Image (tube, coloured by chain):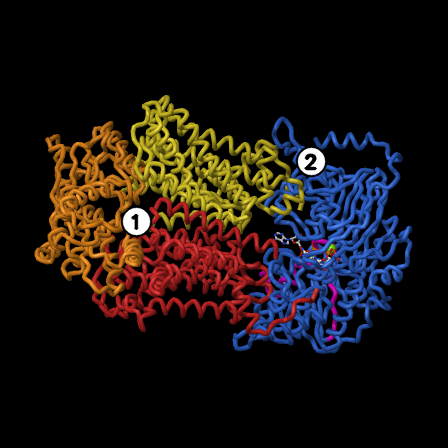
Chain colours: A orange, B blue, C yellow, D red
Amino acid sequence: AHAQQVGLAVANLQANFFNQIKQSVEAEATAKGVTVTTADAHGDSATQVNQIQDLITKGVKALIYIPAGATAAGVPVRDAHASHIPVVAVDRNAPDAPADTFIATDSVAAARTLGNYVCKITGGKGKVAIIQGQLGTTPEQDRNKGFNEALAHCPGLQVVAKQASKEWHQDEGFSIAQDMLQRHPDITVFFGRADALALGAAQAVKIANLDHKVVIVGFDGDTAGLLAVQNGTLAATMTQKTQYMGRLALDSALRLAAGQKVAKIQLQPADLTTQANVGPFIAQHP
Amino acid sequence: MTLARENLRDATPVAADRAARFAAEGLGKAFSGVPVLADVSFTLRAGEVLALLGENGAGKSTLSALIAGLLRPDGGTMRWEGRPYAPASPGEAMAAGIGLIHQEMRLLPDLSIAENVFAGRLPMRGGRVDRALMNQRARAQLQRLGLDVAPTQLVRRLRVAAQQQVEIAKALTQNARLLILDEPTAALGGAESERLFAQIEQLRGEGVSFLYISHRLEEIARIADRVIVLRDGALVARHDTARVPVSTLLRDMVGRSIERIFPPLAPPAAREVLRVEALCAARGAFRDIGFAVHAGEVLGIAGIVGAGRSELVRAIYGADRIASGRLLLEGKPQHIAGPRDAIRAGIVLVPEDRKGQGVLLDQSLARNLTLGNLDRLAPDGWLRPARLRRFAAALIARLGVKGRPEQAARALSGGNQQKMVIARWLARAPKLFILDEPTRGIDVGARAAIYHLIADLAGAGMAVIIVSSELEEVLGLSHRILVLSRGRQMGILDRAEADSVAVMRLATG
Amino acid sequence: MSATAPAGPAQGFLRRRIAGAQGPLVGLIVLCVAFSLASPVFLSLRNALNVIDQITVLGILAIGMTGVIVIGGIDLSVGAILALATMTMGWMSRDFALPFPLCIALALLAGAAAGLVNGLLVTRARLPAFIATLTMMSVARGLANLTTDGEQVVGFPDWFTRLSTVRHFGVLSITVTLFIALALAATVFLNFRAGGRSLYAIGGSAEVARLAGIAVRRLTLLVYVMSGLLAAVAGIALAARLDSAQPSDGLGYELDTIAAVVIGGASLAGGVGGIGGTVVGVLIIGVLHNGLNLVGVSPFVQQVVIGLVIAAAVTADTLRRQEG
Amino acid sequence: MSATAPAGPAQGFLRRRIAGAQGPLVGLIVLCVAFSLASPVFLSLRNALNVIDQITVLGILAIGMTGVIVIGGIDLSVGAILALATMTMGWMSRDFALPFPLCIALALLAGAAAGLVNGLLVTRARLPAFIATLTMMSVARGLANLTTDGEQVVGFPDWFTRLSTVRHFGVLSITVTLFIALALAATVFLNFRAGGRSLYAIGGSAEVARLAGIAVRRLTLLVYVMSGLLAAVAGIALAARLDSAQPSDGLGYELDTIAAVVIGGASLAGGVGGIGGTVVGVLIIGVLHNGLNLVGVSPFVQQVVIGLVIAAAVTADTLRRQEG
Ligand SMILES: Nc1ncnc2c1ncn2[C@@H]1O[C@H](COP(=O)(O)OP(=O)(O)OP(=O)(O)O)[C@@H](O)[C@H]1O
Ligand SMILES: Nc1ncnc2c1ncn2[C@@H]1O[C@H](COP(=O)(O)OP(=O)(O)OP(=O)(O)O)[C@@H](O)[C@H]1O
Ligand SMILES: [Mg+2]
Ligand SMILES: [Mg+2]
């Protein structure tokens, strides 16, 4: 008999976060004898719509959809549903056409946790610089919301600089942080809205030879981010459970395909990761 | 639309505007402050062929450009058919009835012959381009000029002479009342030129006026009614008849008299420089060619257009591939895989297509002249700018090129560009010097200088091959003449037995 | 030399159209055969319709780009203009509640205006096309983002999304029909209208074209305006397909579009190219992506394969031309 | 006609170097003055060093691209080759535990090999440079991803990251020094070596150059190999700067690089351009980003401003040339 076929439409494999999920889905599929067909949209929603159309033609029994673009498009979900294919949305969900189940990190809560931690370790005082992700995207908006909620309870932390990157890239983080330090040499906290941005900021701080300590925090728990937490470059990051989400996504997809019920929304907490607890995460990503 | 214009012309009584159709009054033009034309005045009547003569760089093409709306004069006025005339664009000039064949061929290589002929004025029918009519008219015009090719062929595939004929066809189909022909015969052979003259005769009969520019003075008496001469941008002579002795024209142009055009040739040495055995072209343009050239000898290669002469010399130079045959240089077999090998072995070529093969138009004279000499100027690979400049300046002086080393080649007159391409190779003292159409577009004075130069090169023991469509040039300058016809070697004539009749008999055989 | 018998005009025309695209066409056919063997679902009407769906946006962009490349120019701004148009439409509809057809008209206007600026920068400021359209690429993308501060717009009228989703008579959606109509119109223009033929002359040599009395500036302007306008049309088709408009729409499409035109046999040096070839080029890209997805090739390997196939398709064409 | 007094060779050389980049240079100066007025921290040694830091990678890429554009080619694959090189280095070090200098050597080799393939596709398969390097762009990016299945590599030796982070004598890091040295070497090559000068001839007309005995094929090959090699060097500098290697490194850099070279006065038609102009072009891009960040302009407005400044800088140059 034919193995079950599952389609995996990834937003952009150039982002470590998505690549982790993809690897987890594929590993789990191998373990279960399921065939996964993966498509990479390179961040373009239109490409992704095409790819999902192809996956549907190919005859996948369920679709794991990690939406590309600023926010999730509903069209692929509707197309899949029209062909009676269940959809598992990961990371982002289309507001106008929700998937059968939605798996994501509770970003607002996670960013709030991170903000509270920053408030704690700085003693509630400092000048904060924020390197934003791509403006208008869901993760950027959620992380902004959660972090601001935390700052509202920590009046001593003052945001002195805020600049957006275009593509969440590390070298953008570097240049932006370097230019921020040029203007505000007294920055004491950097929040990179993704680990790559935070790591870029860390490099900028390193070569700036400042006379005070700078707390740098990231978000995601990328491979590189965790190592940076371990060696103290980053004070903390919020580790998203990519491996678990990948496994969960495949599981949910298979259950939906088999006609079983799955919860409509499956939000996952992210782990506040510091030097104290990073070890196990590096050995085995959650 | 074109048809309407044709009718209009037919309706105009020819005799009625026999008076001055075009008049220039005090025209002047300067490029970046350097005057090129000064105070030029002349008139042109209906149905008249006015020859415009002058040395290279005298300003002939510039004057044409002013009349045809390519350039605007800095001073002076023009009148056309009785009204003030100041064209702002070539389109306006064409609309007024003035057409130009530009000296530098200006065709669109990736379009068909017919589309080139009718570029900018495609015949339309029912809102669509009427290809059938366009092709038919292009074919008819080309046949009248003696070129029998499919009008749908891409111009890229045509050789230089055929391209020139397309260019002429383009002008002749314009139904212009004034046609400026800037060296139309420079790339043509005798037969093709004759065809053109016949066309000019016919159109003149219909009342079309011509401004005719040429360096071939023997043509002037043949077709012109009157002659004007430019020297350094000034109009220096007006002859109301074309039956002016060539020597007078020469003096007008150059400001001195030229004793003899063709220098005496010393007898060649016995030492063989190049031997060609059973050479066949990879593309079939020629086959079974075999001859030898000796030290101090000038070998002419004659033939009508398309005979395969250019192909042959390009193959010897390694620019095109050969299918079979042998090349021996000073008795040693050579493997020449490309021009680079040829140059190293001591063979150089002045190619026939100056613009496409000879000159870097957008680069300076100095760069153009040092091209091909860098290995000698910089034996260790290091360039010394001062040395390069001196080198370029010396060559410019030696051939009397009108231009400065740092000037872009594009700004030179056509003839001066040609001199530059020849000059490039002089410093190398090659064993074999091949020149394909060496004097295309070169004025008489400079031509004599180049002939003397060739004779000097031969006198110094170099072997020379010249390919030319001007029979007189081959006859006057060669020790022996190899005649090709349709890629076959028809024979080699000695200087003593060679005359135009003998050569043409072989060439058309 | 005169052995070529003159073909009848109609037959000659067809033959020439196909000949122009022959090399890439062979590549396309080989590709289709290979995918048919590799995937049981490739060769089906439904999949063919999918492919046409999928190439519509790229195809519309490529029509405009063909004109630009034929005159020897280049347009790097098509992706950004596409985004500017979709965002203009979305913004006008969301924030100003204008009637939707008016929003569409404004989007088209924005595209044409951006194209006009490109054209003016090229003809008046005499910027190289590369720089002029690079400028527009940056400016139009910035403006597209500024409209809604980077947010996407969702919720278009139903009739609008149906333009791309409903296949009339089970076959063609309105957007696909529009693409085909535009391609035909462009073919007719480039082959039969004096203006279209003049573009080839301009691409061959702008100077020669000027000497022949062709209105080089006006036609250049027209070509860039058309490219901008078609980018807007493509943007509207994209928005209908995605049922949303976002500032990142069309990011990086410029390179795909240029690639499609060049794969179709056009030369960046100008003077060569045509809609037939371009459509084949677009189809090659579309079929390649579609087929590799159907076969289930992993994404990283896809990148490698796509590169190799493009090289192979164009090499075949180059070799053929050398022989001929 | 001969009013220009011949200048001494050295002086003339300098003057010509600067003249070549004059238009953009004026733009650069205007930009610097404007930013100095707008931001109190712009005009400082430290910020100048930051800018140089930030342009190093682009600068190294642009050196190679200058050669390619001078011969009338184009190289779309530099960003992808950069990634292939960094990933080769990272992969070899992480998964095979090779000594790090050897990993660097292998990365350089990978870059040169990719460049060689580009060169062979252009000279042997006679593909247009656009298609050949587009192919390589796709293939090299795919391979870069395949090495580690899309994972980034972190944890390089300390001495390696210090190459870009430690400013010796408080001024120049090793990578910046390398960039300056490469720029000087390229200037010398293009101006004083027969090989370099020949590139301009090739760009002017490959056929004229061939008939004049220039080894067109060999030099073309050399130029593409150098471009690939320099992309690898840029990749190593980037990896040192970021202390990591990821397959997305250098994404989209090709367009920035080409833009820098063209802003610096080179023509995509070939035969014109030089390292002086290119460095000015790279600086314009670098100063623009840096200055706009310092002033605190939002990224969307930045896009608009960057576009306009590029157009303005090049227009100034074009107008100046028309007068001259
Ligand atoms: N665009 C230009 N810029 C600068 N100088 C120019 C330009 N065009 C022509 N000249 C100069 O003007 C002079 C006249 O050139 P023109 O082409 O009219 O000569 P010509 O009489 O046609 O010569 P030839 O017989 O060689 O064709 C030459 O010295 C030439 O260098
Ligand atoms: N690349 C080519 N492809 C096909 N035919 C060619 C090619 N080159 C030359 N020919 C043909 O080879 C023949 C010889 O041409 P070639 O130019 O050598 O003659 P030629 O005697 O030098 O005449 P011309 O005066 O035109 O230079 C011509 O019939 C020409 O059409
Ligand atoms: Mg002239
Ligand atoms: Mg010839």
Classify residue C248 by image quadrant.
top left
As rendered, which of A185 and D184 lies closer to the eye? A185
Q: Position of residue A145 (x, y in %)?
A: 19, 41
Q: Is residue B317 magenta?
A: yes
Which quadrant holds residue C215?
A: top right
Mark 2, secondary structure of its residue: helix
Report the residue marked by disc 2.
Answer: B136
Q: Report, in whole angstroms, how far the alpha carbon at label 1 lies from the one at label 2.
A: 63 Å
Q: Position of residue C253 (x, y in %)?
A: 39, 42
Pointer 2 local density, CA inside 10 Å: few below 14, some 14–19, many at least 20: some
The quadrant of the image that shows the N terminus of chain B is top right
Q: Is residue D219 left or right of residue A227?
A: right
Q: Residues within 10 Å of mark 1 (few under 14, many from 20)?
A: many
- Residue D246, position as x, y percentages in the image: 27, 56
Task: Give the residues drawn in magenta, as a range.
Answer: B296-323
Q: Is residue D110 visible in the rendered structure shown here?
A: no
Amino acid type for the residue under numbered disc 2: Gln
Q: Which quadrant does the C terminus of chain B fall into? A: bottom right
Q: Which mark is residue A165?
A: 1
In the image, is residue A11 above or below residue B262? Answer: above
Q: Is residue D249 above or below residue C181?
A: below
> Who's the residue at 19% across and 34% down the image?
A87
